[in-house]
Image (spheres, rainbow, N blue to C red):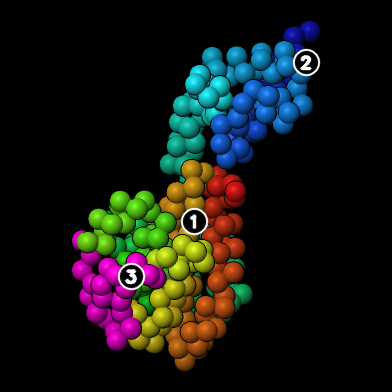
C-alpha cells in the first residue's frame, strides 16, 4: 500500500531538485510552487524532506531555496569519475573530420596549458601531442583560460607570465594580451594567428562544468598552406558547438 505514495514523494522530490538545479539563482517558495505546479502544502512537505537530507538549503534573510551541500558533493564525486578525454573523444573526432583540421583538448596547468588529447587530421611534425605543454599568451586555448578566470587570478598570472616572442605576431606584454582577452570573452572563443608557430592559426572554445567554471578547452588549428587564417576563424561556431556538447555532458546548463 505504501509504494505508490513513496513513488510519488520520490518523483516530487526529483521535480523540485530539477527546478532548483536549473534555476540560475535561488528561488522563493512561491516561485517553486509556480514552477512545479504543486499545491502549497505538498510543496512544503517536499521541501522539508529535502532540507532534512541536505539536498537543498534555505536562506532565511532572502527566504529563498537553493541546491544543498549533499547534492554538490554528489556532483563533485561524479565529476571526479568522469574521464574528460573519453567524453570529448567523439565530439573532437567529429569536429576534426567535418572541418578537415586538427583538434585538441587541453586543461590549465599552472602557467601553461596541458594537452590531454589531440586529433591530427593532417599530421604535422611539430604538432603538440597528449602530455605536451604550451604557453598561455600565444595559444588560443591559453587566451580562453585567461579570459574566463577570475579577475584577480588573471591579474596575477599576467604579471607572472614570461612573454616569450615566438614570431613577429606574438603578443609580448600584459597590455597587448588584455585587449585580446576582452575580445575572447566577448566573442566566446579565442584565437592565435601565427603567434606560436608562424604557419599556424588556431581557435579555441571553453568547456564549462556545472558551476559555469571553465575546466578545459576545445581547439581547432591548421597550417597556413592548408587553410588561411580567415578559414580557420570561420569555424568558430563549430568549435563552440563541440565545446558546448562536452560541457553539457559534464553537467553544464546554458543560461
Name the foreground residue: 254 vs 197. 254
Q: Which residue is mark 3?
A: 177
Name the foreground residue: 165 vs 65. 65
SS at circle 1? strand
Q: Is residue 72 visible to us here?
A: yes
Mark 3 surroundings within 10 Å by alpha-carbon count, few (fewer than 14), some (14 through 19), many (20 or more): some
Mark 2 surroundings within 10 Å by alpha-carbon count, few (fewer than 14), some (14 through 19), many (20 or more): few
Disc nearer the start of the sequence (2/1): 2
SS at circle 2? helix
Task: Name the mark on residue 4.
Answer: 2
* Res 146 quadrant in image: bottom left
Residue depicted at 57% across the width and 57% down the height? 244
* Res 132 quadrant in image: bottom left
Residue depicted at 68% across the width and 24% down the height? 30
Disc nearer the start of the sequence (2/3): 2
Which contiguous range is marked in magenta?
Answer: 160-180
Residue 190 position in % (x across, y down):
45, 69
Residue depicted at 50% across the width and 88% down the height? 228
Real-space CA distance between mark 1 and mark 3, rounded to the nearest whole angstrom? 21 Å
Amino acid at each position: 500500500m505504501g509504494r505508490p505514495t513513496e513513488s510519488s514523494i520520490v518523483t516530487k522530490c526529483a521535480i523540485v531538485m530539477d527546478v532548483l538545479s536549473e534555476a540560475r539563482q535561488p528561488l522563493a517558495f512561491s516561485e517553486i510552487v509556480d514552477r512545479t505546479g504543486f499545491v502549497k502544502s505538498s510543496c512544503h512537505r517536499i521541501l522539508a524532506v529535502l532540507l532534512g537530507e541536505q539536498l537543498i538549503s534555505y536562506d532565511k534573510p532572502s527566504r529563498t531555496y537553493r541546491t544543498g551541500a549533499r547534492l554538490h558533493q554528489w556532483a563533485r564525486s561524479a565529476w571526479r569519475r568522469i574521464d574528460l578525454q573519453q567524453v570529448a573523444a567523439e565530439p573532437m573526432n567529429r569536429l576534426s573530420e567535418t572541418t578537415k583540421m586538427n583538434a585538441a583538448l587541453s586543461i590549465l596547468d599552472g602557467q601553461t596549458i596541458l594537452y590531454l588529447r589531440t586529433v591530427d587530421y593532417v599530421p604535422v611534425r611539430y604538432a603538440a601531442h597528449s602530455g605536451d605543454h604550451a604557453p598561455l599568451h600565444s595559444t588560443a586555448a591559453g587566451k580562453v583560460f585567461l579570459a574566463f578566470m577570475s579577475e584577480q587570478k588573471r591579474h596575477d598570472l599576467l604579471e607572472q607570465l614570461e612573454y616569450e616572442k615566438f614570431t613577429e605576431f606574438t603578443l609580448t606584454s600584459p597590455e597587448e594580451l588584455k585587449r585580446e582577452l576582452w575580445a575572447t570573452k566577448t566573442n566566446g572563443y579565442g584565437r592565435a594567428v601565427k603567434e606560436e608557430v608562424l604557419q599556424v592559426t588556431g581557435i579555441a572554445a571553453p568547456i564549462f562544468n556545472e558551476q559555469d567554471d571553465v575546466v578545459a578547452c576545445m581547439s581547432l588549428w591548421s597550417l597556413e598552406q592548408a587553410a588561411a587564417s580567415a578559414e580557420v576563424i570561420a569555424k568558430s561556431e563549430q568549435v563552440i558547438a563541440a565545446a558546448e556538447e562536452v560541457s553539457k555532458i559534464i553537467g553544464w546548463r546554458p543560461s
